[in-house]
Image: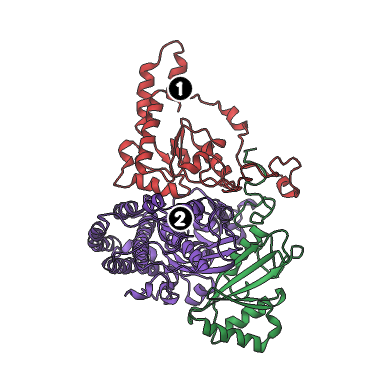
């Protein structure tokens, strides 16, 4: 993340299609996922990397455990409210360029679990590039999603993802990261005053679930 | 089924400590003993040390909420199993809504530790004498107890990052 | 030299300062899911390891209370997602106990057959990930290759590879498809050489032996006191198997051994699970040879969905179908606890009904929940790298722990 931006910024008026296609080809051919398997979809993700459906053919050779070395985060599984700040933090730790694939119904929209514990869609926390339906989706669907993401990467321009100047990055407060606590959450013991959902919603008043 | 041997255990307990039993229920091939709250540790140790019972394995502690209008509202079920005699029995403690304290059985079986934390987390039943009673499944700053019947299914607010 | 050191470089023995608390965080390649361990380390040695769970809490037990009995089967798949047929079986058997249904013999045999295939599949994932964490990556690919064959079989029977929901209250979803028995026989013939291949790869490997023998010791009395069951308990020498102790679904008619090992360490649990795969293979072969034609659903028109043909031609079948799907069936009031031997231990379902179509309380006693609570006992005094081996030997699945 540096050289291509320096080149692009040094030549502002020059069309960068050749540079774009070279860089995008390099990026899409080696999309390394960060291991973010949460639940059942993680097992199907493991199946997609095993020998029957080999995801490494498409460039995802290794699943990096450290987000600092990863390009794409495949959120596979249900995201609970306790896990959501962790998810955001891992996303923030990934360097640009980064993409997110939301795998499975639970990551896309909460899935079967429409209740207090699950975040109804991971796009409430991170921006998502490709959504995969299914519960769990077949490994072939994950491979298709990676190929769709590769098509999307090819259409990008090198000017889209800019470096953030370092001083600005250090002072930024990113929403969703673990808060610097001053004990205020522990002190508050009462439920918030305005609770728009205390009335049973009309979905809950239906006779059958 | 093994209800014959469980009957002898229940009669043994009835003979020796009749005030430790409130009620005995036989249903669906299972034996349930309703125990008053203050005697649960005594009954547990009794059953653990009884030679023909030998209930050395606590399979599960499970709380249940009968509903906000019921009296008593909460119940705590202890499922016991014997690894040598292979029979099972259930102990039940009934609790009112205002006073949800139960003595902890972690001294009898150490596995009760996490089960009691889970029951506290989801129902709000407080176990006296528990070494480390805090939330285990829900986030630490969660308000309310999720599995109570008056806690709405979707919670109070949708999730937001702020 | 005789010069004295400045005061800040003086060597003072402050033992408390050598301890470091780190979080083996929820996102970690070796924790088999979103588990967080708080490790208090003294150098490389673990003084205390405390698990912090709840990162996958899904509120499934609350969801059960809002869904009819047959709708809850779908949710049980997602609990222990490596052994979904086992979860289905426990839930369905608890409901059948409340209703007092009698299951036909063909359904019981198919249940035993598919559950044993599922047990082999679950142990294959355990083996692959355990070996991967310790460093043997080849075994991972070999195990998943075998597992693909099993998942193809289960998909042929039920339509789902990982979340089959094959069992229904009163029997099965539908009968086995044509060609299933031939394909299963083919798989069962091909499996023992594959198992020998895994033994060749791992059991004689001195590095694997050094990393697993003597690690994660828990004595038999401690194991029973902490509620361990399944391979973790049998690895400590206690001969306890729910299929023998409280038999269900016809298991008393099958001939199999219960493997136990006396060593109480990670190596013992590894050997127990390898031998269990062989025993499951034996049971599956016996079940396959006992399949006889017959009904696969119980004779209870108010509970079990009728045949499609009957529903389209007979009026009462249509009415029953409509009522079961739209309103559900009333289950007699009461409570049951149904334990089964899942691949990880004793999976128990506590089901409480108050006479309506939806349960009043469903609680799953997940074996991984209890097995993980014994982790602090097993890991005191071990090194950090051994924690990974111990977690692998416990075979935890976070979906079951957090529910």
Q: Secondary structure at mark 2?
A: helix
Left or right of C192: which side holds A157? right
Task: Name the one closer to the observer, C372 or C76.
Answer: C76
Q: Secondary structure at mark 1?
A: helix
- Chain in green, by letter, is B
Q: Nearer the viewer, mark 1 or mark 2?
A: 2
Left or right of B127: which side holds B58? left
- Chain in red, by letter, is A
- Chain in purple, by letter, is C
Quadrant of the image for the N terminus of chain C?
Answer: bottom right
Task: Name the one closer to the observer, A201 or C55.
Answer: A201
Q: Position of residue A54 (x, y in %)?
A: 31, 42
Q: Quadrant of residue A33?
A: top left
The reply to whether residue B134 is visible in this rendering is no
Q: Residue at x 35, y 38 (%)?
A: A143
Callouts 1 and 2 in the same chain: no
Q: Position of residue C227 (x, y in %)?
A: 52, 70
Q: Quadrant of residue C38?
A: bottom right
Give me the C-alpha separation between circle 1 and circle 2. Answer: 73 Å
Per the image, the residue denoted by label 2 is C316
Q: Position of residue A189 (x, y in %)?
A: 75, 50
Per the image, the residue denoted by label 1 is A5
- The subunit carrying tag 1 is A
């Amino acid at each position: 993340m540096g050289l291509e931006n320096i080149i692009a910024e040094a030549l502002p008026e020059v069309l960068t299609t050749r540079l774009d296609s070279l860089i995008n080809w390099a990026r899409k051919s080696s999309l390394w996922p960060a291991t973010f398997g949460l639940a059942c979809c993680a097992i199907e993700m493991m199946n997609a990397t095993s020998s029957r459906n080999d995801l490494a053919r498409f460039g995802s050779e290794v699943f990096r455990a450290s987000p600092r070395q990863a390009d794409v985060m495949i959120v596979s599984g249900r995201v609970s409210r306790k896990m959501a700040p962790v998810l955001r933090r891992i996303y923030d730790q990934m360097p640009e360029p980064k993409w997110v694939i939301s795998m499975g119904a639970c990551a896309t929209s909460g899935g079967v679990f429409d209740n207090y514990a699950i975040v109804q869609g991971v796009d409430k926390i991170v921006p998502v590039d490709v959504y995969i339906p299914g519960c769990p989706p077949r490994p072939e669907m994950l491979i298709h999603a990676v190929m769709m993401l590769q098509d999307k990467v090819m259409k990008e321009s090198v000017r889209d993802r800019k470096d953030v100047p370092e001083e600005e990055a250090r002072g930024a407060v990113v929403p969703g990261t673990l808060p610097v606590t001053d004990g205020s959450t522990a002190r508050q013991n009462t439920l918030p005053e305005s609770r728009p959902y205390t009335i049973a919603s009309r979905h809950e008043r239906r006779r059958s679930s | 089924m093994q209800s014959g041997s469980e009957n002898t255990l229940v009669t043994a307990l009835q003979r020796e400590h009749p005030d430790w039993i409130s009620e005995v229920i036989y249903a669906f091939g299972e034996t349930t003993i309703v125990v008053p709250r203050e005697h649960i540790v005594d009954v547990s140790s009794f059953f653990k040390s009884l030679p023909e019972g030998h209930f050395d394995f606590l399979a599960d502690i499970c709380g249940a909420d009968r509903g906000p209008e019921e009296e008593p509202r909460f119940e705590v079920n202890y499922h016991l199993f014997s690894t040598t005699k292979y029979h099972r029995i259930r102990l039940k403690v009934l609790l009112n809504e205002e006073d949800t304290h139960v003595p902890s059985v972690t001294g009898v079986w150490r596995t009760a530790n996490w089960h009691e934390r889970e029951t506290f987390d989801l129902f709000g039943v407080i176990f006296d004498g528990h070494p480390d009673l805090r939330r285990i499944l829900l986030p630490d700053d969660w308000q309310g107890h999720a599995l109570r019947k008056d806690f709405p299914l979707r919670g109070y607010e949708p999730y937001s990052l702020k | 030299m005789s010069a004295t050191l400045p005061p800040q470089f003086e060597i003072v023995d402050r033992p408390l300062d050598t301890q470091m608390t780190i979080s083996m965080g929820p996102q970690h390649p070796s924790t088999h899911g979103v588990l967080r361990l708080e490790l208090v380390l003294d150098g490389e040695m673990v003084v205390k390891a405390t698990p912090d769970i709840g990162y996958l809490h899904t509120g499934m037990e609350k969801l059960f209370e809002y869904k009819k009995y047959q709708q809850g089967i779908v949710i049980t798949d997602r609990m222990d997602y490596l052994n979904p047929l086992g979860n289905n079986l426990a839930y369905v058997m608890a409901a059948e106990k409340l209703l007092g249904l009698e299951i036909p013999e063909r359904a019981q045999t198919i249940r035993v057959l598919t559950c044993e295939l599922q047990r082999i599949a679950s142990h294959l994932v355990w083996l692959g990930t355990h070996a991967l964490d310790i460093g043997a990556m080849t075994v991972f690919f070999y195990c998943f290759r075998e597992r693909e064959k099993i998942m193809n079989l289960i998909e042929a029977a039920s339509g789902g590879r990982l979340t089959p929901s094959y069992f229904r209250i009163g029997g099965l979803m539908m009968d086995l498809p044509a060609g299933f028995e031939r394909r299963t026989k083919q798989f069962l013939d091909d499996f023992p050489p594959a198992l020998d291949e895994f033994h060749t790869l791992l059991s004689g490997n001195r590095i694997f032996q050094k990393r697993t023998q003597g690690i994660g010791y828990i004595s038999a009395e401690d194991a029973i006191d902490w509620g361990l069951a399944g391979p973790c308990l049998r690895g400590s020498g206690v001969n306890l198997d729910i299929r023998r102790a409280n038999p269900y679904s016809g298991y008393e008619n099958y001939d199999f051994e219960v493997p136990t090992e006396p060593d109480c360490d990670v190596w013992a649990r590894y050997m127990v699970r390898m031998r269990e795969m062989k025993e499951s293979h034996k049971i599956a072969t016996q079940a396959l040879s006992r399949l006889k034609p017959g009904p696969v659903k119980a004779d209870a028109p108010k509970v079990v969905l009728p045949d499609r043909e009957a529903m389209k031609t007979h009026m009462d079948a249509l009415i029953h179908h409509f009522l079961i799907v739209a309103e559900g069936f009333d289950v007699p009031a009461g409570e049951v606890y149904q334990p089964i031997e899942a691949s990880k231990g004793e999976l128990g379902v506590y089901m409480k009904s108050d006479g309506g179509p939806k349960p009043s309380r469903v609680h799953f006693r997940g074996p991984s929940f209890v097995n993980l609570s014994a982790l602090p006992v097993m890991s005191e005094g071990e090194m950090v790298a051994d924690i990974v081996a111990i977690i692998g030997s416990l075979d935890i699945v976070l979906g079951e722990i957090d529910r």
